Image: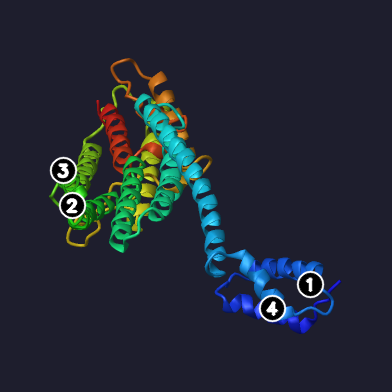
């Protein structure tokens, strides 16, 4: 039996590398196979170099590096089919969560926000990136990969905008304008000029581009071109007008002919609780407890968004809202039907607090406060 020396092993390994095989694991596998064949078939005093050349030639058709290409191709296709399976399953999961969440949102059932968020996250972080990775391997042109990449980024931005819009998070309008601008002025032109070069796809490219332009036009029609700043300023002005009306109502002299000390105590508690919750909401937005009269010149308006962490389960904000609900029910139980106030707070309990926007909450609190003050004056 032929015994291979360390020098011959180095010779074989260097030759394999010189023939274009760069993968270290493949080099070691080829080395093991070649050494086994030589030791088992070469005579003890045989010609090592000539036998090695005949042996290595059995591993390829034209060049040895071909075996590395075939190995990479097999590994690529293995990963490709795995990614494609994950892509399909994640797409089904994202669509399912989003559709069910949207239905829950429409029916005002609990858990809608969680389902919508799950659908958006799966679609944005798993499904769309996997579309790019799988389709990229099917596209040879660099410009085609660029169009695909921008399309996927556009999809991710659109999902992010939808999530921000549904959850009443800030900067949703900024995300929308970025998404719409990228879609209209980058993606559509790139798609058109990339596809029009191929005569076989010319008609399909023109038709699809027209549809995309029409879609962009519909999006533009549904988008207010007025600055969202004006919307926030108007909303803030409305809130300040409500506050001025509350202040004016408080200045009116009370009717003390039917004074009820117990009822007055509850009404004061309601007013104080409303004020504290409003101060908390405004502080989260502006860093101070009230909105100044010259808010517009100081750029201190309240932007519409969801309620902050203080209103999550068990936190101070939620406890104050629960307390306010109890106070309103107690107040109504002490009043006749003509003096009872609508309890809008009761409707947003049971897990719906975080679904409210700051504007809606501020407006509800001001209305409650105003109802109580008016009742105290009559």
Q: Residue at x 62, y 69 (%)?
A: 57
- Which label sits in the foreground, 1 or 2? 1
Marker disc for residue 207: 3
Between 213 and 243, the one nearer to me in the picture: 213
Q: CA distance from mark 1 to mark 2?
A: 60 Å
Provide the residue designation for mark 2.
Answer: 199
Image quadrant holding the C terminus, namely top left
Quarter the N terminus occupies: bottom right
Task: Give the structural element (helix, strand or loop) at label 1.
Answer: loop
* Residue that numbered label 1 is attached to: 42
**Residue pointed to by mark 4:** 50
Point out the tag, 1 or 4, that comes first from the N-terminus: 1
Which residue is the extreme one toward the bottom?
7
- Is 34 in front, or is 276? 34
Q: Nearer the viewer, residue 320 or 135?
A: 135
In this rendering, position of residue 243 left or right of residue 123? left
Q: Residues within 10 Å of mark 1 (few under 14, many from 20)?
A: some
Tally of marks:
4
Using the numbered discs, state the Cα–Cα distance from disc 2 to disc 3 in whole angstroms.
14 Å
Q: Is residue 183 above or below residue 321?
A: below
């Amino acid at each position: 039996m032929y015994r291979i020396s360390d020098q011959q092993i180095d010779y074989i390994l260097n030759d394999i590398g010189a023939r274009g095989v760069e993968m270290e694991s493949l080099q070691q596998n080829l080395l093991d196979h070649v050494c086994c064949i030589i030791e088992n078939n070469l005579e003890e005093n045989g010609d090592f170099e000539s036998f090695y050349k005949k042996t290595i030639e059995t591993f390829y058709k034209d060049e040895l590096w071909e075996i590395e290409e075939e190995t990479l191709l097999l590994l690529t296709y293995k990963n490709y089919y795995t990614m494609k399976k994950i892509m399909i399953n994640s797409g089904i999961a994202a669509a399912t969560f989003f559709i069910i969440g949207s239905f829950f949102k429409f029916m005002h059932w609990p858990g809608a926000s969680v389902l919508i968020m799950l659908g958006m996250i799966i679609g944005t972080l798993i499904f769309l990136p996997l579309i790019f990775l799988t389709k990229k391997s099917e596209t040879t042109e660099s410009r085609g990969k660029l169009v695909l990449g921008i399309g996927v980024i556009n999809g991710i931005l659109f999902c992010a905008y939808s999530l921000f819009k549904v959850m009443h998070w800030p900067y949703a309008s900024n995300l929308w304008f970025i998404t719409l601008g990228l879609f209209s002025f980058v993606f559509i032109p790139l798609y058109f000029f990339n596809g029009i070069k191929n005569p076989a796809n010319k008609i399909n490219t023109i038709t699809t581009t027209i549809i995309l332009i029409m879609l962009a036009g519909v999006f533009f029609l549904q988008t207010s071109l007025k600055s969202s700043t004006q919307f926030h300023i108007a909303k803030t002005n409305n809130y300040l007008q409500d506050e001025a009306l509350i202040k004016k109502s408080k200045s009116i002299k009370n009717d003390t002919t039917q004074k009820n000390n117990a009822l007055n105590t509850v009404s004061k508690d309601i007013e104080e609780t409303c004020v504290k919750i409003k101060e908390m909401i405004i502080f989260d937005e502006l860093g101070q407890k009230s909105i100044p009269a010259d808010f517009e010149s100081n750029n201190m308006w309240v932007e519409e968004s969801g309620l902050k962490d203080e209103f999550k389960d068990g936190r101070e904000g939620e406890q104050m809202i629960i307390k306010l609900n109890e106070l309103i029910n107690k107040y109504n139980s002490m009043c006749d039907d003509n003096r009872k106030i609508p309890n809008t707070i009761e409707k947003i309990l049971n897990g719906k607090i975080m679904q409210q926007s700051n504007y809606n909450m501020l407006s509800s609190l001001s209305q409650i406060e105003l109802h109580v003050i008016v009742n105290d004056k009559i």
